Amino acid sequence: MPRPFPAPSRRLAAGLLALAAPAAPAAAQLPTVDEISALETRIRARLESNNIPGAAVAVVRRGDVLYAGTFGLADVESHTPVTDSTVFEIGSVTKQFAAAAALQLVEEGALDLDAPIHALLDWLPGEWRGVTVRQLLNHTSGIPDYEAIAGYGIYDRRATAQEIVAIAHTRGMDFPPGTGFEYSNTGYYLLGLILEAVEERPLGEVLNRRIFAPLGMTSTRMADPEAVVPHRAEGYYQDRNRTLINTPASHPSATLAAGGLVSTVGDLARWDAALYGADIVSDEMKRLMWAPTVLPDGRTVDYGFGWRVEPYDGRRQRYHYGMTHGFIANVTRLPDDGLTVIALANRYREDLGRIVVPVLDLFLEAAGRPGP
């Protein structure tokens, strides 16, 4: 049944956010109003054809928000539109924040990347002995992914760390530690436990003190279903008849650093701006964070610490997507162009790359035009 879909709200080069970041060396050309309108028509058609209730999209150049568009509904039942303030679950985009906090601790001498995780969590299965913190960060631990075993439904309920570890331990190691690559949410769940153990406080407090509060990311926090979170979107999936189904909010005890945060496009733009400086993550630590992983047999994996680093059309690219039971997210950075696209939406099992790529391409094409 057709669902009313509000017209997109947009701002082009309108200074949506006050961000502190190095200015671009020269003003680049922007898409025309007609080009933005055509792009929004394309985005809206994509959302409607895939039954995605709502989305927010932002384009940022070195800290300056060039474009922010909001589409559709944050809550279908109440017909609440998505706005600049709408809070979405961001799934695995969470991993880059956990990685950044871990690297801060490394720089402070409080955490060793090559320390065995048993030195920090001595209750883990013996089979995981020898896995290091570094291997959790770059998915070379060999520890099976609990999400792949239990499914996304595991995120919808309260779980203990022991339960999550027990799920992952129902399967043998994927490979000896450090010898292969296999994306593992268990690795980042364990990283969250390590951050809590080192800092002696809950993960949400660790990340807020180290990253969110200093950057003014006031809407970014753990996705606690019991908390009152202003402007929080509802999450959805669809059944075989394309009927939207409400999903429970993810529980931080079941997600932790693997995918436990909620945020807004504005907060993620502040994070993007900070990555051009060294106040939150030093240049040395950023080099580690964005370096591809080299395996002992010489194979290179396009994953650093919490970021995928495969190229985009010959350009350096740093990105990550996220998915929970009711949400999808994508943050894609092209550092040589100073260009970032942030996209958040509230339906499970969709590919936001089909929105991010046309947005990137339009702004890249416009930036390459001769000036007036």
Image (cartoon, rainbow, N blue to C red):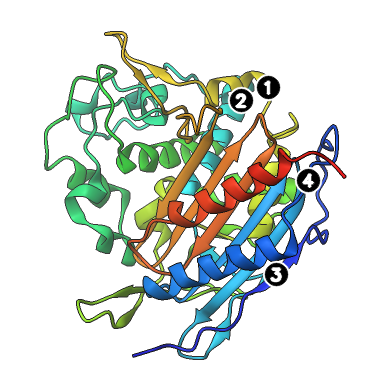
Q: Which residue is mark 1?
A: 283
Which label's residue is closer to the chain start, 1 or 3?
3
Judging by the rendered image, the residue that carries numbered circle 3 is: 10
Say which amino acid is labelled 4.
Gln
Split into 4 quadrants, where in the image is the N terminus?
bottom left
Comparing 135 with 3, the one in front is: 3
Looking at the picture, does residue 284 appear above or below residue 261?
above
Circle 1: element type: helix
Is 370 placed left or right of 320 in the picture?
right
What residue sits right under mark 2 in the picture?
A: 286
Q: Nearer the viewer, residue 206 or 243?
A: 243
Residue positioned 48% across, 89% down in the render: 4
Query: Residue 185 occupies which quadrant of the picture?
Result: top left
Relative to 183, residue 2 above or below:
below
Q: Is residue 100 left or right of residue 164?
A: right
**Mark 2 or 4, which is nearer the eye?**
4
Which is in the foreground here, disc 1 or disc 3? Answer: 3
Residue 93: assigned label? none
Q: Earlier in the sequence, mark 4 or mark 3?
A: 3
Q: Which mark is residue 29?
A: 4
Residue 205 seen: no
Q: Amino acid at mark 1?
A: Asp
**x%, y% of residue 230?**
62, 75
Would you say the residues marked 1 and 3 are in contact, meaning their CB atoms lie under 8 Å apart?
no
Which one is closest to the eye, mark 4 or mark 1? 4
Alpha carbon distance from label 2 to label 1:
5 Å
Which residue corresponds to the image point at 40% horizontal and 46% vertical from the top-left?
258
Residue 284 in percent (x, y) is at 64, 18
